[in-house]
Image: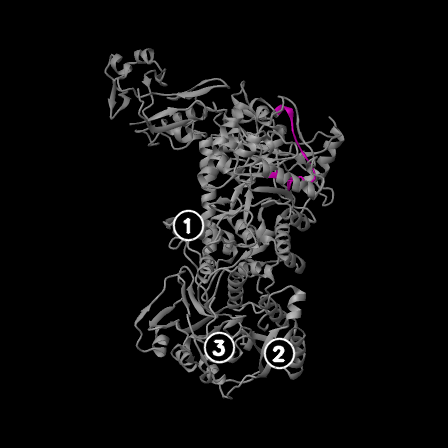
Amino acid sequence: MRKEGEIRIPSGCAIAAMISKSGDRMCGERIVASMRPMHDRSNGLGGGFAGYGIYPEYRDFYAFHLFFDSRSTRKECEALLKEQFEVVKGELIPIRKTAAITDEPIIWRYFVAPLPSVLRDLQLDADELVVRTVMKINTSLNGAYVFSSGKNMGTFKAVGYPEDVGAFYRLDEYEGYCWTAHGRYPTNTPGWWGGAHPFTLLDCSVVHNGEISSYDANRRFIEMFGYKCTLQTDTEVITYILDYLMRVQKLTAEEAAQIIAAPFWSTIARVSDPAQKKQLQYLRTMFSSLLITGPFSIVLGFNGGLMALNDRLKLRSMVVGEKADRVYIASEEAAIRVMEPDVDTIWSPSGGEPVVVRVTGGQADGR
Amino acid sequence: MGVELFYPEFEVVRNYDRCIACRVCERQCANEVHSLLESKGIMISDESKCVNCQRCVALCPTRALKIVKSNCTLRENANWQNDTIREIYKQAQSGGILLSSMGNPKPLPVYWDKILINASQVTNPPIDPLREPMETRVFLGKKPERVQRDETGALKCELPPQLELTMPIMFSAMSYGSLSYNAHASLARAAEKLGILYNTGEGGLHEDFLRYGKNTIVQVASGRFGVHEGYLRSGAAIEIKMGQGAKPGIGGHLPGTKIVGDVSRTRMIPEGTDAISPAPHHDIYSIEDLRQLVFSLKEATEYQKPVIVKVAAVHNIAAIASGIARSGADIIAIDGFRGGTGAAPTRIRDNVGIPIELALAAVDQRLRDEGIRNSISLVVGGSIRNASDVVKAIALGADAVYIATAGLIALGCHLCRTCQTGRCNWGIATQRPDLVRRLNPDIGCERLVNLLTAWQHEIMEMMGGMGINSIEALRGNRLMLRGIGLTGKELEILGIAHAGE
Amino acid sequence: MKRVYVNEQWCLGCHLCEYYCAFANSGLSDMATALKGTRIVPRIHVEGDNSVSFAVSCRHCKDPICMQSCIAGAIYREDGVVRIRKEKCVGCLTCILVCPYGSLTPDETGIAQKCELCLQNGSGAPACVRGCPNRAIVYEEREDAV
């Protein structure tokens, strides 16, 4: 049987997210709890979380989370990092041993800042250097895998059920203004730590439920721009697409949604505002290869907010609930009721209709 | 009795129990195969003139006729086959280059038939095109690398000129002159009705068809026949023809006998003169010359029309396409070695060029490797025979396909491959008024519309099966394809896995 | 009322309409059996030469001069279709003389025959129209009927 990264992995899944619009930090325990009622949507082959605003003391540094297969790989990787980055801190990520999670790799995190001289020499901005470094480690340094690389945010993932993964990483000890969660039901892999979700690049993290039919069209397009789809998962390609649209092309989350879940031409024809119509036509034509078809529900996390989005036919379930300044998103209403038993409103966004939540205060560096 | 005289290739089999001597076969055969033997009141045939176009068979009201391959052949020899020997006799007699028409008939691999398409099961739902929207609309043309915003932060939504098609299919270039007026009328009307485009070929544009401008690609070929400013402005796009799949590296030659009346006027050459298109464009001997022509044409049309550069699929097509993509062209059209023609030297038709499937896969991958795939659209032709060929071409990476032979077949062509004689019994590849009349454009247009409507339905069904509801999500989606019976090298070039993988 | 119209632009002069007409009115089910070895007497005729040709059949005039001139009262109009009661026809052929279109002919037995739009024979709709390979004969409703 071929390993992950050597073959395309489709999977079903559970997703959940919670965010405070005013930037209040919330304990990770709640998002972990939300995954319990959706236990059957995962099969124990992967679970993970992303928290935003969790490293306020290191908010100006890129937080790299890495898996290593051995001490020597770690040493090799550290040497590589130090060529281009100032490493202000490197440590084991604290874990809690549990019977449910076994065979863990060496799990480290580094807080780093690119060396200004390197940026000058390479004529790159800091984000681009980080992206290239992540791609380089993940494609060419065997046994090392960067699974989180944003500022003031972090991803935590493992093979196991999501609720066990949350306990393993001691998420009850973290506080963030936004959390996303994922339980995995892959159909083509024995499970791999790096293959669990969320998938991240810089501060952009994606949790996804679905199996997109446009995968190879999207992959072959996005790979033109330096991205390498090593995992061959939907989530990976969606993350790269969103990074490309929002960071490289500097589009807003809403504009990105108009590309990846573009309205049907017949819908565009009915849009009455001519400027809006022109924009929809333009975005769909310009980035036609980034249209994503097939079922998906995703939550994209980024510094300062999130976006939840369904495929344009709404072939996957996704509900949104609100209470005061909090917004909750999940594959099933039951998960929302766990996070907030007494929500004010709860609704199901229609296919292709993005739900964008932006944080206005606290820890958020808005985008 | 010379050595070159031998038994005809086809036999006309007439069932005299059924033949009512209505003489429709006689009246409809421009090759004068059939005649009435007045003394006996029966029909007789001169089979040596038969080209097996099946016109008489199709019109015989009592089904008394059939044309069969003669079984009077030379002694079997796998090396010296009958055709090979006949060709030698012909050349020994004539001293000339052998000519033939339509696409390469040799048993070379058809990769479309060795590629299989995917469908969704369980993990991802198929989509029913009868219940859900299913989009086949495409826009051909250059897409800029970056989005731009104005001072207010709003997106600048202007794109370079794009061709909008309701489905990823266009009629490829066939000139007025090689085709009849009625064949062109059928194509133009069908293109308008379908919301796609047809292509004038290098014969200029008859003034009657100016009204179909929105659905017309005007071609500029090496002979520059019929090219003037008004012509360039009258179409939706301009195609520079560098080569053709049936005869890469070869020009064209429309005999003076076909340069009559309107054809002569439309081509802007005197009646009766041979229309000879040189092998190269004599102002394009290199890629930078091509760039100049591309921009000359753009200047002439105020940058309002996309420019297509059409080339034949030859060995280093990927590098050529990359050069074209950087020449300022908006669209590349590649024509594979099975593409048709009104006349080509037989040796060239059958031996020069490469299959479109391999050319397409190589070009699409090369343009992606160079990061410029989005700056040019890719159209492929050269024997796209049905809707599944279209789906496979799109999944390999094409934006759209060109069809020609399939369209002619819809118009009545029976692929007898003797277009060069100018005696097309179906009224398609002829200028003889009595033959041209046989193609009623009302019927021709209707049949073309039917054909492509049917293909569109089939494309939608296949897309729906894959769980794809818009054609752009199929473009370059090679994961949806698997090879069957292909070597590792072939799979590598096609960029697809083998069935079962 | 639907009538048979011809369009000489598309007529190929192939004469198939004549044979389909003769077959439709033969009452037989096989064309070869019906027409083999016979001289056909169709109700539609192709006129012209290789450069221009067209098929001629009854126009089904609103005020048919053949009907007015029939001495036996054999010609009548029914739902707009001009028809002949064969058993009443005396074979004087006055109708053939007066028809400005040359649409009537004597049949094999010498009495008058004309196109009756195949409404009463096995064809059900004009066989010439169905058999025309180039849509030069059509069966349709038009405003400008005579």
Q: Secondary structure at mark 3?
A: strand
Q: Does the residue at mark 3 contact the one at mark 2 (Cβ under 8 Å)? A: no
Q: Secondary structure at mark 1?
A: helix
Q: What amino acid does circle 3 point to?
A: Gly
Corner quadrant of residue C142: top left
Vertical relation: B128 (above or below) A45: above
In the drawing, does residue A271 fall left or right of residue B306? left
Q: Secondary structure at mark 2?
A: strand
* Spot occupied by residue A239 in the image (x, y as percentages of width and height): 52, 66
How far is mark 1 from mark 2, CA to CA?
Answer: 48 Å
Q: Which residue is mark 3?
A: A48
* Spot occupied by residue A263 in the image (x, y as percentages of width and height): 42, 55
Q: What amino acid does circle 2 point to?
A: Val
Q: Which residue is mark 2?
A: A87
Q: Disc 2 sits on a residue from what chain?
A: A
Q: Which residue is mark 1?
A: A275
